[in-house]
Image (cartoon, rainbow, N blue to C red):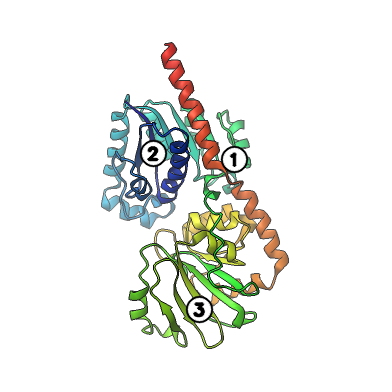
Amino acid sequence: MKDILFASNGHGEDVIAGRVLDRLAARRPQLAVEGWPMVGEGAAYAARGIATVGARNLLPSAGFATLDPALMAHDLKAGWIGTYWRQAVGARAMRGRYRMIVAVGDIVPIGAGVLARTPFVFIGCAKSAYYGPRHGYTGLEKRLLCRHCVETYPRDPLTAGELERAGVACRYLGNPMMDGLEGTGDRLGIGEGETVVGLLAGTRAAPRPLPAPARLRFVFAARSEFDPQAFAAAFGTDPRLAGWRVASAGAREGVVMRLEHPAGMQVLVAKGRFPDVLRLSRVVVGMAGTANEQAIGLGIPLVTVPSSGVQGERYVRMKMEYFGGAAVLAAREPDAIAGAVAGLLADPARCARMATAGRERMGLPGGSDAIAQAILHRFDEAAAGRSAA
């Protein structure tokens, strides 16, 4: 029998699981742990050498089908029913294989813990009371947690209070999403007096009149697979990039590409420096999921933009329920995005209010280690109970 199974249902959830796993390994390296990435390939587990098990959800919506009928239709054609049936059957087959399950995400890993009839704890990183009744914790989720979950670790104090009132055993121990954002202190060659607009994965901005353009630096936090050489080779074919030139490209880490405009603006593309990009930014423009939430948690005003993929307009409207006063929504048009950024840069008082709202919603760092300690405590309690029996 293995000690612990981590079951998580999404890329962001896998990352959070990985952070808690790191702290568990530091405290008790002898634990026998496996991972079940219920959505996607589980890169966070592979990067840590954690063996993975269970049926995967590799459907087109990447787990967002319930937000959009069109996404649900694509998933149904691609085998939605069969996918979840295989996961349910797989969860039942895990009975007796693990001493404890750590469920990370929402109803899907909760359901896996229930079907496996294994003591489980729940890291509630996907939902919050800030969403309100439509996209917050449902009555079913609260009943399952109340009846079957050993302990729940919500992402913010407001949610902890709501779950406690529903009879759920829970403790607020911080938000793992806010861990690992300390940064290196690398300023990426940006001067102290320059204004930085951070661009998160999937975003783009177009030049238009903004305050002191010669002092503007747009910094794109690129994904690891971004190829600066390939981008440079294709540069210039898009008329929207007229006037821009590639000043440098090719580094493997840090600033891997630099674009310049005659007005004095620069675009820097950075790899391996995501926390530094956030901490340098006065405003962030993002189509991302977890990265957007981390930005507001650091008190950075967010301009959120729907993507053309699964995190489209319905997804962003749902996220705006959570963001509240911490973000502004802009259409997926360069002028709309630039206008929103310009408005925020010209309104420090509003930015200060947004910073307060964002920090309140995302809570405190340190959650990964505190939750790892709590998991070990519950694991030892269960082990002691079995020994006594």
Q: To which quarter of the image does residue 31 belong?
A: top left
Name the residue rendered at 52%, 33% in the picture.
373
Q: Please state the horizontal and vertical placement of residue 195, each as a whole percent of the image.
A: 62, 73
Disc 3 secondary structure class:
loop
Q: Could you say which disc has been placed on residue 206 in the image?
A: 3
Residue in front for this viewpoint, 387 or 90: 387
Residue lying at the far top of the rendered structure? 389
Mark 3, other Cα within 10 Å: few <14 / some 14–19 / many ≥20: few
Q: Please state the horizontal and vertical placement of residue 173, each as a whole percent of the image.
A: 58, 38
Given the image, on which type of amino acid does mark 3 rest?
Ala
Tell whether 45 sits left or right of 317. Answer: left
Q: Could you say which disc has been placed on residue 141 in the image?
A: none
Given the image, on which type of amino acid does mark 1 rest?
Thr
Q: Would residue 7 be seen by someone viewing this image from the given angle?
A: yes
For marks 3 and 1 on the same chain, the one whose residue lies earlier in the sequence: 1
Disc 2 secondary structure class:
strand
For marks 3 and 2 on the same chain, the one whose residue lies earlier in the sequence: 2
Q: Nearer the viewer, mark 2 or mark 1?
A: 2
Tell whether 74 sits left or right of 121. Answer: left
Given the image, on which type of amino acid does mark 2 rest?
Ala
For marks 2 and 1 on the same chain, the one whose residue lies earlier in the sequence: 2
Separation of residues labelled 2 and 1 (CA atoms):
21 Å
Name the residue rendered at 55%, 81% in the picture.
265
345 over 113 or under it: above or below: below
Q: To which quarter of the image does residue 71 belong?
A: bottom left
Q: To which quarter of the image does residue 299 belong?
A: bottom right
294 over 230 or under it: above or below: above
Q: Are marks 3 and 1 in contact (CB under 8 Å)?
A: no
| Circle 1 residue | 159
Please state the total of marks drawn on the protein image: 3
Q: Please state the horizontal and vertical placement of residue 23, each as a whole percent of the image.
A: 48, 39
| Circle 2 residue | 7
